[in-house]
Image (spheres, grey):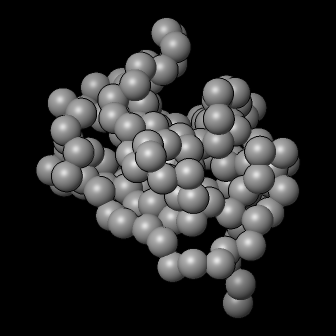
Amino acid sequence: MQPDVEIIARPANIVGESAVWDERNQTLLWVDIIAKKLHSLRPGQPVRAWDMPQIVTSVGLCSDDRVVLGLAKQVMLWDFRQPPVPLATIEPDDPLTRLNEGVVGPDGCLWVGTMQNNIAPDGAPLDITASLGRLYRVRPDGRVE
């Protein structure tokens, strides 16, 4: 016997990732990396989307109503009203890497990885030719470890 499944939205994502449930606001958040968008869905409402200034690789929840976003090289804080505010820059001098998946841990820090950039400026795929990448902890005050 198959469980009943109800499709509640069909967003046209190119590369949708980093889904996180915001219990406080009863909202599902996720990113579309290549389309440079942050999406949200509240049950019973249409999907909302916000354009980001560059690829957006992850979204995490802050202790208030803000989110923490991983972009290509920057970690940003965003309150959904003002423009995103830079919190940290990761590997700024390495043109071969970009941020990848990230998650906010129980310590309130964003744990985020880097990888060899596999996305061209026009969104086309690039070959991965090297094993590049590191794991970082970004503290709420912007310190990077």
Q: Is residue 33 above or below residue 27?
A: below
Q: Quadrant of residue 7?
A: bottom right
Q: Image height check: is 75 above or below 131?
A: above
Q: Is residue 121 above or below residue 115?
A: above
Give the residue at x 19% y 52%: 145
Residue 86 visible in the displayed image: yes
x%, y% of residue 115? 51, 65
* 5 is higher (above) or lower (below) than 48: below
Residue 39 shows in this picture = no
Picture coordinates of residue 77, whole percent (x, y): 39, 27
User: Within the image, what quadrant is residue 24 found in?
Assistant: top left
Q: Is residue 111 left or right of residue 79?
A: left
Residue pictured at 48% horizontal, 53% vertical = 94
- Quadrant including the N terminus: bottom right
Q: How many marks?
A: 0
Query: In this rendering, would 140 be left or right of 77?
Result: left
Q: Residue furthest bottom?
A: 1
Foreground pick, 104 / 137: 137
Towards the viewer: 127 or 19: 127
Q: Position of residue 6 (x, y in %)?
A: 74, 59
Taking the spot 67% from the left edge, 74% from the top edge, the residue there is 128
| Rendered residue at 77%/45% (across/down) | 121
| Outermost residue, top side | 82
Image position, residue 16 (x, y; %): 68, 55
